[in-house]
Image: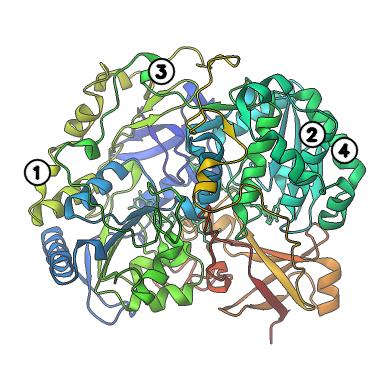
Amino acid sequence: MGKDIYSICFMCTVRCPIKVTVQDGTVKWIEGNPHQLKGALCAKGSAGTALLNDTERLRYPMIREGARGEGKWKRVSWDEALDYSAQKLKEVIEKYGPQTVVFGERQNLNTHISKTFMRAIGSPNHYTHDALCKGSVNTAFRTLTGYTDAEFTVDLANTKHVILYGRNLFESLELKPIQALMDAKEKGARVTYIDIRSTITASHADRFWMIRPGTDLALNYALIHVILKENLHDEEYVNRWVTGLNELRAFVEPYTPQWAEEETGIPAAEIVTFARELSRDKPQVIFHYGYRGANHTNEIYFRRSIVILNALLGSIESKGGLIIKKGPKDSGYGSFGKLVDQKDLPNPKVERFDGVGGSKIPIADPAHGVGSMLPFAILNEDPYPVKGLISHRFDPMLSIPNYGLNKKAFDKLDFILTVDINFSETAWYSDVVLPESIYLERSDSIQMANGPKPTLYMRRQCVPPRYDTKPFWEIARELAKRMDLGHFFPYETIEDLWNLQLKDMGIKIEDFDAKGFVSLSKNPILLERKQGLKFKTPSGKIEFVSSLMEKNGFSSFSKYEPMAPPKEGEFRLTVGRNAVHTHVSTQNNPYLNELVSENVLWINTEEATKLGISNGQVVEVSSDHGFGKLKAFVTDFIHPEAVFMLHGFGRQVPVTTRCYGKGASDTALQENVTDMIGGSPGLHDTFVKVRPAR
Ligand SMILES: Nc1nc2c(c(=O)[nH]1)N[C@H]1C(S)=C(S)[C@@H](COP(=O)(O)OP(=O)(O)OC[C@H]3O[C@@H](n4cnc5c(=O)[nH]c(N)nc54)[C@H](O)[C@@H]3O)O[C@H]1N2
Ligand SMILES: Nc1nc2c(c(=O)[nH]1)N[C@H]1C(S)=C(S)[C@@H](COP(=O)(O)OP(=O)(O)OC[C@H]3O[C@@H](n4cnc5c(=O)[nH]c(N)nc54)[C@H](O)[C@@H]3O)O[C@H]1N2
Ligand code: SF4
Ligand SMILES: [Mo]
């Protein structure tokens, strides 16, 4: 009989709680934690065992020997790799200053440790993936409510109607929300899904609109128009909690459903019916603010329109709507400890490399920065040179649009250090590669998951590391020690770190044994809607006319600019995920690669016919920035103006043999343009030409 260990999945960053069965030092079985997920796990989560045994993942520290990207490596000991990295970082700091070192990571449980490291060396330049994923969602929330999007959650279980704008929930998965939505659907909840193509989520929806690419903002302006014209909003809530209603009313006056029909292709009468239906369901309505979907350089106004619609229907802090997350203090506990809270830790006040908080991108979130600025900062040395780059659990080469430009920028760096579990494209182009033990082989910092019921989760090591790898919390400490900064890392073991996090909470490590998590509240905590809401804006209300935007010279409402259709023979390139892969992480996983080994190009049947392209035929896709070859998937289920491909394929690292050269890379084709108010990349602002391959 095996032993069961509760832990946290990390095949993607959703971090589902899991139960891992271990026998004879190996993992026999992984399932969703039965106390929370009824045992459910997705395909990627199940493929954790294949990752554990994968011989093509990073197995030992390496120092580059040949030219960057040539693939010549020297296997070294941990001491040698860390000594060398510390030496190189010290050289950069001495020569150019600490601000020229940039650290990028996908936000993770150890981010408090990386931030500590950067502050300790004296650099303000820590950035996360956040802006590349949903920066404009974050900024939209802050401009309206003072809270970030991450301080909100959606109460899908109790909703009556959820509206998803390209939020392809059933493929771009999060297990708990899917289970909650399925429960709600059984109680009669309705789903409206809006996408430029029909996805699995579309097949679960009660209403599906195939919208013209990039025109979701027009739809929302018309919806707001109808809601205000017919007084369908939650008057009591809006009167009490919203400022700027009259300005909004005047602004949306010209945006009629008839006007929107022209722009979006959605019939005016259907928009009116939809608005009336939503009003009947209010306030248990969720306009899902999403992540990707319509990604353009004016995205901030689209995301703001989504939050505004929620506010108009009174759904913010309503059962079945959006809920402000509650933390340990709200449930009567002391605060959760973070390494970065040390009193004597420096807090460098130098301008950031990406211009966040300065004149370039004044109101994006400085807690995350804007990663898409990285290649420009390096190439233009603006505001100063960037000379050292550390990437941890993040692949900027592929996750920042325009692969060619990224490579050119990386060529200018003095030192590139990457901590990963796989040979990512960034690792391949680095000077030193440090392999982290995978999630099944390591324990990590505790997760404080705020929410209606705040809960702590623990990732526990299940098996010993297969190869010569270490956990990041240890790597960071060892690097810091070699830079004479070890005193900011006062822990030896993971238990020391856990005790530091739990010390003010009255919770012990053993409390996690029974279920793998500790709930801080029995029931969901909701604020009282009549008087008890608290918004973190200057007015204390939801500001349709935003102090933050106006103060920085941005108008709160933006006149609709029609979306340019593609030129003859061109298509708008759209991208996304499927249920089997995680961004750029899993394409070489033995199991998942078997399920989906390459991406295909979705193209509308009529358009394909015009170009002489048949289903399954290999096509060439080109943009101003790059080129790719992949098979066509000819279908009626995509809008004729767009083509679509999965992110993460077309890989260029030869030692990842299962995915090398398969399919095409969206990153190679995409232009790097950013919403300079919100911070998100305009991932769907690139046009491509498609033709049969020669
Ligand atoms: N072109 C393009 N760019 C995009 C997107 C897109 O669709 N197209 N999507 C955007 C979105 S939504 C997001 S969230 C970001 C995601 O961007 P990334 O975070 O870069 O993508 P991931 O695939 O999540 O992971 C990146 C790296 O983390 C490594 N990794 C996985 N687990 C571990 C671990 O336990 N330890 C360490 N040290 N490393 C680990 C993986 O091997 C991989 O190399 O990309 C954004 N950028
Ligand atoms: N399996 C899996 N699940 C994941 C992840 C993963 O990598 N793999 N990553 C997680 C992360 S970090 C994120 S950010 C989320 C992403 O979750 P989603 O935001 O749901 O992301 P995508 O898969 O990028 O899907 C975007 C959808 O937008 C559609 N779209 C394109 N243009 C438009 C448009 O103009 N209007 C509308 N309405 N739709 C449009 C595309 O056709 C596509 O179906 O998924 C999370 N869950
Ligand atoms: S969605 Fe799947 S891969 Fe992501 S954490 Fe959950 S089980 Fe793991
Ligand atoms: Mo994301």
Q: Are marks 4 and 2 in contact (CB under 8 Å)?
A: no
Q: Position of residue 432 (x, y in %)?
A: 24, 67
- Above or below 666: residue 123: above
What secondary structure is marked by label 3? helix
What secondary structure is marked by label 2? helix
- Amino acid type indicated by mark 1: His
Residue 228: give its label.
2
Mark 3 or 1: in front is: 3
- Amino acid type indicated by mark 4: Val
Badge 4: how crowded within 10 Å, few (<14), some, or many (20+)? some
Badge 3: how crowded within 10 Å, few (<14), some, or many (20+)? some
Q: CA distance from mark 4 to mark 1?
A: 63 Å
Mark 2 or 3: in front is: 2
Sequence order check, earlier mark of 4 and 3: 4
Residue 313: give its label.
none
Q: CA distance from mark 2 to mark 1?
A: 59 Å
What secondary structure is marked by label 4? helix
Q: Residue furthest bottom?
A: 694
Q: CA distance from mark 3 to mark 1?
A: 33 Å
User: For residue 415, which quarter of the picture?
Assistant: bottom left
Sequence order check, earlier mark of 2 and 3: 2
Is 616 left or right of 433, judged from the image as shown? Answer: right
Residue 272: give its label.
4
Of the 4 image quadrants, the one containing the N terminus is top left
From the viewer's side, name the closer residue of 452 and 384: 384
Q: Residue at x 79, y 34 (%)?
A: 228
User: For residue 179, which quarter of the picture?
Assistant: top right
Sequence order check, earlier mark of 4 and 2: 2
Mark 4 residue CB less than 8 A from any atom of ligand 2 = no
Name the residue tied to disc 3: 330
Name the residue tied to disc 1: 487
